Image: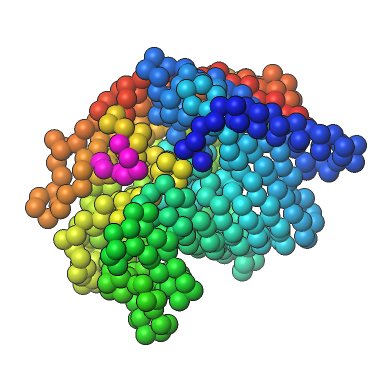
Amino acid sequence: MFQSRNKTFSLVSILLFIGIQLFLNSHIIGQMDTSLHAKVEVQFLTSDSGTTPFWMRSLQYGQVPIENPGAILKAWTGKNYQIKKKYDWKYEVEATGWGGKFNDFWLTQAFVSGRRGKWELWAGRRKEMYGLGDSSLTGGFYAWSGNAVPIPKIQIGTRDYMNLAKGWLGLHMTFSHAWMDNQGPTIQGFLHQKSLYGRFGKPDSFINVFAGINHQVMWGGEAKVKTGGESDYYPSKLNTYFYVVTVLKDRELVTTDSTATYDDLGNQFGNHLGSFDLAIKIQPEWGEILLYKQSAYETGRGFALTQINDGLTGLSIKNKTGGIIDNITFEYLYTANQGNYVSGLATFFKIKDPHQSEIESYFNNGRGAWQYGGKGIGTPLIIIDKESQSAGGLEFTLNAVKSYYCGISGRISDTFFWKTRISQTFYASPRNHLAPRLIDSDFISQFSGMISFQKIVNEQCSLSLQFGYDEGSRVKNTLGGSLGLKYWLF
């Protein structure tokens, strides 16, 4: 995917996909379940530099190309759950095609899932985000943001919070196994992912408190370029999976794989990352106030609290009464401590990290960076080198970041909506802060902004218009726009 760009195949495949969906659905339209839907979208992109502005292409699950002019065609069909049923199933299939400077076609989504109550089992590609925060207007959750193409996986978990203790306690959890792509230095690799979140307070209580964690591990596989050393093959068997899932370090519990390296045996199997999340939600009659913190961690150092000050802090205010502004979100992303932070909590409890002087180069690892399909899986504000001015590879070189972000959405009328995203970000290379910490002169700056408008023409059709602008030293300076049309077939 994304490596071979066959122009003829792309356009023919898109048309064939749409034709098959229309043919199949036309034969069941008379007896069709009302939970069955389909739509097509087309979008035209252009800019003065041939580069799509940052906020027009970010958080789009890899569906918007970096280079233009060009066009995007999407075709989607799916069946939703009928919640009144105790058991039910759903599916979604979404095809994306590019035409212009690059031509490509792939399935952005293709999954099937089954449900019993709040529990769900599904397999395939599916659009997701992980973390506590304002998912509708965020600048990108830290670890899993919806920026890259969905990773194929099998997952079991809850669809939402299960209500316990007469609704005063809610639990949401997921557990999955996924397959990484072969674009980095490791091929045939796996992804282990799990999450656990709790809610204290009834869903409609004036105050809700949330807390939880998401945990991702890239593990297994083999080196794309083999040198004859111990790192040509990585342990990929079930005994390794035990240590990946549990993060236990007692290697006598389960016999270790013969291909385990010194790093595996002395630290953790695979590359671990994620975030510890906290949030408080206040629900007055007029809307909602959400304050949240996603604290970054990598490898096995999370519980030493040396990365606790890095991550995403946000404030979201929603006005449910409607108006010119109905949602405003402020976020601050900071990732410049990188494992050298000494927290007051760690000092109080006398927690010492033997790796205190080592740098955690966020989203980078010798086995492959935190990317899929050439795009960063985590927050897009830590920019992958491939999308920078230098047009580098699949690494995150300037990952010591300070970013100020604001997102605002609202409506001009009942059928006319608008949204804007603005960020001012500063980038620097990782360095050991013990001698001394980063100072402002170490950073380069980047401003990015976008404004979009959507006009609902009727129940089936809507039009969209976007403008984006980038100026700074991290991504290419550009001014661009797009025009789009969405049409619901049924």
Q: Residue at x 73, y 25 (%)?
A: 460
Q: Measured along the vertical axis of the image, is residue 335 above or below residue 60?
A: below
Residue 376, given in percent of the width and then of the height, sits at 40, 43
Left or right: where does residue 269 sit relative to residue 1?
A: left
Q: Residue at x 61, y 31 (%)?
A: 9
Residue 311, given in percent of the width and then of the height, sits at 33, 50
Among all residues in the image, which is located at the extreme right?
Answer: 30
Left or right: where does residue 211 sit relative to residue 169?
A: left
Residue 179, given in percent of the width and then of the height, sits at 51, 56
Instruction: Specify whether residue 412 is painted magenta.
Output: no
Among all residues in the image, which is located at the extreme left?
Answer: 435
In which quadrant of the rendered view does residue 352 lie?
bottom left
Q: Quadrant of the C terminus?
A: top right
Q: Measured along the vertical axis of the image, is residue 397 above or below residue 156?
A: above
Is residue 55 visible in the rendered image? The answer is yes
> What residue span does the magenta drawing correspond to?
392-398
Task: Compare residues 132 and 224 and report the one nearer the observer.
Answer: 224
In which quadrant of the rendered view does residue 75 lie?
top right
Q: Residue at x 83, y 43 (%)?
A: 33
Left or right: where does residue 114 sit relative to residue 193?
A: right
Q: Residue at x 46, y 57 (%)?
A: 188
Left or right: where does residue 389 sit relative to residue 83?
A: left
Is residue 467 visible in the rendered image? The answer is no
Magenta portion: prevailing SS class: loop
Residue 241, given in percent of the width and then of the height, sits at 46, 71
